[in-house]
Image (cartoon, rainbow, N blue to C red):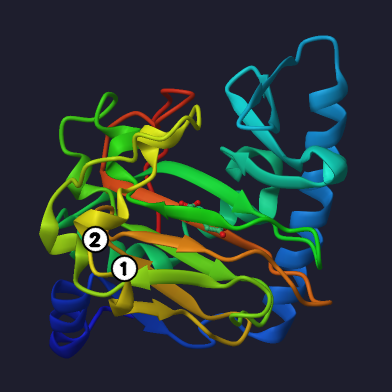
Amino acid sequence: MKLSPSELEAYSENGFLIRRQVFHEQEVKAFRAAADSAAQTAKIMAASADARRYVLDGNLFADIGHTTVQFEHQENAGEIRVIEPVHDLHEQFMQLVHDPRLVSPMRQLVDSAEVALWTAKLNLKSSRVGSGFAWHQDTPYWVHDCDEAERLPNVMVNFDDSSVSNGCLNIVQGSHKLGMLPGCSDPRQLAGFYTDPAGFDASAQKPIEVPSGSVVFFHPLAVHGSMPNSSSKQRRGIILTYQPANRPTLKKKDIVNALG
Ligand SMILES: O=C(O)CCC(=O)C(=O)O
């Protein structure tokens, strides 16, 4: 399960690395069911009296304890876009945190004998209504909570076949080498979190078009984003982010060392 020298070389050159169909069809079916069930749970949580609801750039968010649920824009506000963290909302996702197919490569990418979870985001993108995500790096979200934000590699597990038409992840090849880039300065409330397009070459973008069950490891400094889902097919996936062992998670601040 370890990454080969050529895979490690590709990751350090490109800022990402794809492994196709790592999870087989039965496992992927279970992930899809878990995603749908977590979304139902999150809807109930977001409607509860404990939820703190707010709107940023036209999108409804709800914070329930340490969990943040982000809904789709206005007219599709019944649909969930992101749940973070999601690993403790479903046993299937908790097991995935410890799966050696993710943990073994992560030990190499984090450069640590043992690793812990940093955060886990469920990214849902419903057919026709699923929104895009503008170009961004992850480090600006994390630098205030972690002294080593460059040591927080991601892995996205794709639950559906992912293509440009259903809004697959897009990564700008080599952009992780540019360091932390300036954010945008337009009137959007979250503008500062989106990378200013003047700072990188968007023509180097690579759409991660992969069959379900495939995984993509990517660097926290890699500029990435996605287009809206214009197809009749859903695009669901989870992004798990790891760190050296014995460090607290981003939001709940508990320690979730990976067993795999
Ligand atoms: O779900 C997507 O479309 C992109 C996800 C992403 O870029 C992120 O969660 O950082």
Q: Nearer the viewer, residue 199 or 133?
A: 199
Q: Are marks 2 and 1 in contact (CB under 8 Å)?
A: yes
Q: Residue 170's x, y, as percent?
A: 44, 71
Residue placed at 45% from the left, 41% from the top?
Answer: 119
Q: Which residue is mark 1?
A: 104
Q: Which residue is mark 2?
A: 107
Q: Nearer the viewer, residue 194 or 170?
A: 194
Q: Is residue 253 left or right of residue 11?
A: right
Residue type for callout 1: Ser
Q: Nearer the viewer, residue 217 or 202?
A: 202
Q: CA distance from mark 2 to mark 1?
A: 5 Å
Considering the image in quadrants, where does the N terminus appear? bottom left
Q: Residue 91's x, y, as percent?
A: 68, 49
Q: Residue 74's x, y, as percent?
A: 80, 38
Q: Residue 192's x, y, as percent?
A: 36, 33
Q: Secondary structure at mark 1?
A: helix
Q: Residue furthest top?
A: 49
